[in-house]
Amino acid sequence: MANSSILVVGGGISGITSAIEAAEMEVDVYLVESEPTLGGRVGQLRYYFPKLCPPTCGLEINYKRMKANPHLTIYTMTEVLEISGAPGSYKVKLKQNPRFVNDNCTCCGECEKVCEGERISRFDFGLGKTKAIYLPSPMAFPARYVLDKSALAPGDLEKIMSVCQYHAIDPDMKEEVFELEVGAIIWATGWQPYDATKIDNLGYGKFNNVITNMQVERMASPWGPTGGEIKRPSDGEVPTKVAFVQCAGSRDENHLPYCSYICCLASLKHSLYFAEKYPNTECTIFYIDIRTPGRYEKFLNRATNEAKIKFVKGKVAKIEEDPSTKDLLVTAEDTLSGRRVTERFNMVILALGMQPSTIGKTIPGLSLDENGFVVETDGIIPVGCAKKPLDVMTSNETATGAVLKALQVIKRA
């Protein structure tokens, strides 16, 4: 018998858009997200395109729509293990990891105050730490703390349980494996930055002041690890000369063979972060091609006019560190002049390529191409960056289109 419900896998901006638009068609929707909160990459940004809105613009209104919709069920800390069946009649096996905090949590924060154990924050890409019990982000949805039991200091568990007057701490929660039956699946698991440590010549992981584009976003965020200040990790100083290295891992047969679409735009945006907060900072962008498709050509002109940007057409060959100052010596070939150039910078920002979060995973019933992107089948529809590298605006367009396809699948079955 055909099933008329829809499963959305991934709770970033694409998954949220798909889930709420399908639910508002009065179809039962299950939204699963592997992290403790929805929001995805957009939730980590300072601003996002096309209007340079903060994450609150877009996520907040969708969260409000989600809360009010009786057709939507949300599972966080949940991942898909296996898909079987056919369009109109899928069985999906899932695993939900324990949060160790139940629905009684009011986010009062008393538990966090008495907790001494700390963990490195993946949300901040390793730039900061949280307590062992923490709120995943200031915009966490659901608004509940999560406990990392492996990070607790001796005595922490007893202390946080004693101060929680709502009895929200549940250290005995167990992993749960369960099954859903659905008619169609929208796959919206998004993207992850390419592993910069694999690009040996660029010094990430060896030199403190070589950082990534997503680390800049967390620094620039007012609720990020540096409170909105973009500083050198080595000494906490504001850089006055910054280099951007484009196509770090992209358009390279040794790494990602494709263009990651958003990297040029991200570096232009970051140059505006500097112009807004540190108008004396000079930015140099080393590039192969500056790609600002469609309407984003206007953004290139804006960044060029408002920020102090020097463009060097050429691929960076190597980055070295001056051990006395922790400055960085960037060597590249300037293809327009034909000269090899070496220049000193206080900080280098790698415009890392994006790869799908499905890379390296094997999920029975899910088809991936050679780069790890999800291949569309009749009843499993990839959206956003699970489909291919995209910006937020286009990701949302694919999400809306996927809802129409999913509705056709369940009506036809």
Image (spheres, rainbow, N blue to C red):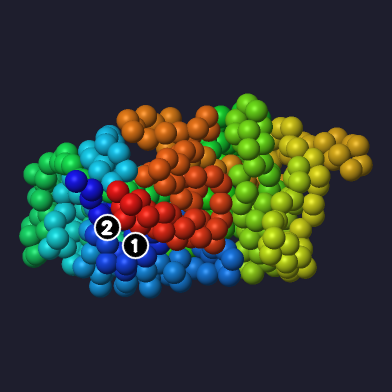
Q: Residue furthest right?
A: 337
Q: Is residue 111 visible?
A: yes
Q: How far apart are the two marked residues, 1 and 2, measured between alpha carbons?
A: 7 Å
Q: In terms of depth relative to the viewer, which is nearer, 374 or 61?
A: 374
Secondary structure at numbered mark 1: helix
Q: Give the image location of residue 270, x and y in percent.
A: 63, 58
Please tell me which of labels 1 and 2 falls first in the chain: 1
Residue that appears at 40% across and 43% down: 378
Secondary structure at numbered mark 2: strand
- Count neighbours of disc 2 (C-alpha within 10 A) and say few if under 14, some if 14 to 19, many if 20 or more: many
- Count neighbours of disc 1 (C-alpha within 10 A) and say few if under 14, some if 14 to 19, many if 20 or more: many
Left or right: 71, with 356 as reference point: left
Residue that appears at 27% across and 67% down: 26
Residue with the mark numbered 2 = 29
Amino acid type, mark 2: Val
Asked if labels 2 and 1 touch by Cβ distance under 8 angstroms, the answer is yes
Left or right: 254, with 298 as reference point: left
Q: Give the image location of residue 252, x and y in percent.
A: 66, 32
Residue that appears at 9% across and 64% down: 166
Amino acid type, mark 1: Ala
Q: In terms of depth relative to the viewer, which is nearer, 179 or 141?
A: 179
Q: Give the image location of residue 145, x and y in percent.
A: 23, 57
Q: Is residue 58 above or below residue 369?
A: below
Residue with the mark numbered 1 = 22
Residue 239 is tagged as: none
Q: Give the image location of residue 190, x and y in percent.
A: 45, 47
